Amino acid sequence: MELTLEQHEVLVNGGNVRLNVDGLDCVVLRSDVFERVSKVIGEDWTHDEMRKALARSSEGNGWDEPEMAVYDQCQ
């Protein structure tokens, strides 16, 4: 796989690159970033388990406060 110069810069700076591979939405990121994320979420979590854990984390950090509703509409 070859990346554009812009995509390469994003990865160098710790970001991620979204790609569509034969209809699959994929994300490319550096292995050190992947390792950090894997330690937090675990590699064997299903999408639903991850979504629920993120929701609990958000609630625990105050993201469910009424004032935060404006952020839910910014998509």
Image (cartoon, rainbow, N blue to C red):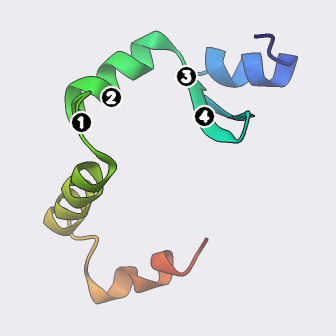
Which circle's residue, 4 or 2, is located before the other in the chain? 4
**Front-most of residues 12 and 50:** 50
Q: Residue furthest front?
A: 22
Mark 2 vs mark 3: which is more N-terminal?
Answer: 3
What whole-number distance in Å separates the C-alpha atoms at marks 3 and 1? 16 Å
56 to the left or right of 11: left
CA–CA distance in space, label 2 to label 3: 11 Å
Q: Which mark is residue 37?
A: 2
- Of labels 3 and 1, earlier in sequence is 3
* Disc 4 and disc 3 in contact, CB within 8 angstroms: no
Say which of marks 4 and 1 sits in front.
4
As displayed, is residue 59 above or below residue 34? below
Which disc is residue 29 wearing? 3
Residue drawn at 82 percent across, 24 percent down: 6
Q: How far is the residue under mark 4 from the one under mark 2?
A: 16 Å
The mark lying in front, picked from 4 and 3, is 4
Give how far apart the Cα atoms at labels 2 and 1 are: 6 Å
> Which residue lies under the disc numbered 4?
26
Crowding at label 4, few (<14), some or many (≥20) Cα neighbours within 10 Å?
Answer: few
Q: Which residue is mark 1?
A: 41
Q: Would you identify the image quadrant in which residue 15 lies?
A: top right
Residue neighbourhood size for the residue with mark 3, other residues' Cα within 10 Å, grouped as few (<14), some (14–19), many (≥20): some
Percent coordinates x, y for residue 57 in the rendering: 19, 57
Quadrant where the N terminus sits is top right
Q: Position of residue 40 (x, y in %)?
A: 22, 32
Side of 3 where 58 appears, left or right: left
Q: CA distance from mark 4 to mark 3?
A: 10 Å
- Name the residue type under label 4: Cys
Viewer-side residue, 18 vs 16: 18
Residue 11 percent coordinates (x, y): 64, 20
